[in-house]
Amino acid sequence: MPEIPDLEVIREFLNDRIAGREITRAEGPKPWIVRSLAADDFLADVVGRKFGRILRKGKDLLFPLGDDRLLAANLMLTGRLQYTEPDAKRSKRLYFLLGGEDFDLRYLDDRSMGRINYVRADQLDELRRLREQGPDALDPDAAFEDFAERLRPYSGEIKGIVARGKVAAGIGNAYVDEILWEARVSPFRKRKSLSDEELRRLFDAIPKTLNEATAVVRERMPPNIHVKVRDFLKVHRKGGEPCPRCGAPISEIGPNQKITSWCRACQPGGLVKN
């Protein structure tokens, strides 16, 4: 799932190339993935509109299309955006594309998991995932006291709480592992067991981790914005490799894409049985 570092780079890349550009073509072998509240025929309605400057809200990219339309895209686990030339070979995973004279913006998805909505600007609040999320994880006005207060109602494992998006929006399964490693907090610790010092470390680790990762992704991802760059991460999916801080082997549990990776030496407590 794309998280803040990926989405920030995708947003920057596309703003440099399509902001202000007119959509002259809209095609979709599987346009049903777009849930439209703004028009009966999404593909017909977008032609002739111009891209505004793309925004990010948590894990969603918001594409203004003219004065009164927005395409809200949460790529979820398997969705991808591809920027390419119109004559480039089309993936079998193509759902729809929005094209100009010399570019295509294509939406690809391996398992139809993306949440794509086409709305009027005044309908954006009808999207529950946006309405209920917390402040952005990179909110420059974030305060520790507010962060701690948002955590207070929760009693479960800290990884799940942070990744849920109601405390800090834009963090998912991969970067929560990285943030917790940076903070030296076990992903399995219960929220109520964390001291004020540990919560402060967690709060400080969020922007540090995300900003450092964004700088790496910015250098390595473009122009292939449909390809995730994650090999530089310190612990996530690095099970069995040495911890870059202490050298102990990184532990890893979980099926499929919900893997949790952490260092038992650097992040003690709240351990689960093997």
Image (cartoon, rainbow, N blue to C red):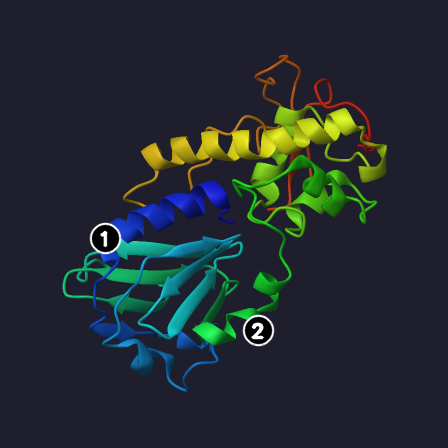
Residue 115 coordinates in the image, percent (x, y)? 51, 65
- Crowding at mark 1 (Cα within 10 Å: few <14, some 14-19, many 20+): few
Which label's residue is closer to the chain start, 1 or 2?
1
Residue 120 coordinates in the image, percent (x, y)? 43, 76
Which of the two marks, 1 or 2, is nearer to us in this view? 2
**Residue 90 visible in the picture:** no
Callout 1 secondary element: helix
Callout 2 secondary element: helix
Q: Residue at x 54, y 26 (%)?
A: 234
Type of the residue with mark 1: Arg
Reply above or below: 29 against 196.
Answer: below
Which residue is denoted by mark 1 in the rendering? 17
Q: Residue at x 15, y 61 (%)?
A: 102
Residue 28 coordinates in the image, percent (x, y)? 33, 74
Residue 240 as seen in the image, left or right of residue 97? right
Residue 101 as seen in the image, left or right of residue 208? left
Q: Residue at x 33, y 73 (%)?
A: 67
Residue 126 tag number: 2
Q: CA distance from mark 1 to mark 2?
A: 29 Å
Q: Give the farthest residue toward the left.
A: 101
Quadrant into which the C terminus falls: top right
Type of the residue with mark 2: Glu
